[in-house]
Image (spheres, rainbow, N blue to C red):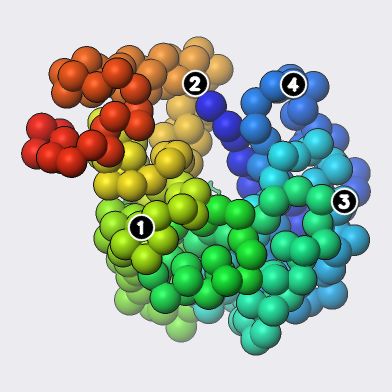
Amino acid sequence: MPMGVGSQRVAVENPQLSPTFEVRSLAPDIPLFANLGAVQLNYRYGLEECLRVVDLLAADALILHLNPLQECVQTQGDTNFRGLLATIATLCQKLPVPVIVKEVGNGISASLAAQLIAAGVAAIDVAGAGGTSWAKVESERATDPIQQRLGITFADWGLPTAECITTIRAISSEIPLIASGGLRNGLDAAKTIALGADLAGLAWPFLRAAHDSEAALDTLVQVLIAELKTVLFCTGSACLDDLRRPGILQSVP
Ligand SMILES: Cc1cc2nc3c(=O)[nH]c(=O)nc-3n(C[C@H](O)[C@H](O)[C@H](O)COP(=O)(O)O)c2cc1C
């Protein structure tokens, strides 16, 4: 079970918070993903900051998140996304670890995926609509009534996770795909794998469990594994890869 941390911008800007990201000693042998907002690359961030956050985590890959809607709803959000594709392509060449690009709950289209693949990204996390809505979250945080209304209008905006997976898989059978956005249990995860994802990601369920207790987190992990095993057993599948065989979707309601 790999883990991705939240944006490490907070640690770049407040180095005293860096130790809060030093989780490698607690998880010595799982894939760990560093994280920064891609748009920060247009606001003074560059190769040096990317290397710093990867080192901080001893990460296996760097995730760059695309969050244009969130930045629009945020008060004084960073909305200059111009030229980022070329910057991402350069980072893919210069960084010693793979670069993964993700959304944050509004989905990645097949046409954007094609451009990201051409830029050299190693994997894509679609982070589609249907789960956590950052437009809604930012609307709640905003004090300005215009930002509040904007967030409500766009609360459900975006490409659904399942649609992102199927449309991107249709244009590339190779690119490693992570499904996230609205997945709530192991059955949801299995369905996205049947649709063509390689990994399934959950944010809100882990936040919720972590808010309750460490024991709730342990239980969540055990339940997810039990749910995945149950899907495999009940569909006569030997492993997760088997879920992709033709016709299996009919037996996963
Ligand atoms: C509390 C919280 C913080 C998040 N912070 C980040 C972040 O810093 N960087 C990022 O790429 N995605 C972030 N996400 C987005 C998730 O990775 C995920 O794409 C999105 O929430 C959809 O999944 P969910 O419906 O399971 O929450 C965050 C999600 C939550 C719930």
Q: How crowded is mark 1: few (under 14 residues within 10 Å), some or many (20 or more)?
A: some
Mark sitting on residue 52: 3
Sequence-earlier tag: 3 or 2: 3
Which amino acid type is marked by label 2? Leu
The image quadrant of residue 167 is: bottom left
Nearer mark to the viewer, of 4 and 2? 4
Does residue 26 appear to the left or right of 238 in the view shown? right
Does residue 11 appear to the left or right of 192 in the view shown? right
CB at mark 4 closer than 8 A to ligand 1?
A: no
Mark sitting on residue 169: 1
Does residue 193 appear to the left or right of 12 in the view shown? left
The image quadrant of residue 168 is: bottom left
- Rendered residue at 63%/71% (across/down): 119
Nearer mark to the viewer, of 3 and 2? 3
- Rendered residue at 46%/27% (across/down): 209
Q: Distance between the residues labelled 3 and 4?
A: 19 Å
The residue at which mark 4 appears reads as 28
The image quadrant of residue 244 is: top left
State the image coordinates of residue 97 (x, y, percent, origin top left). Answer: 76, 48
Mark sitting on residue 217: 2
State the image coordinates of residue 116 (x, y, percent, origin top left). Answer: 56, 69
Closer-to-camera residue (115/84) = 115
Assign a secondary structure to mark 4: loop
Closer-to-camera residue (243/162) = 243
Whether the residues at callouts 2 and 1 have beta carbons within 8 Å, the answer is no
Sequence-earlier tag: 1 or 4: 4
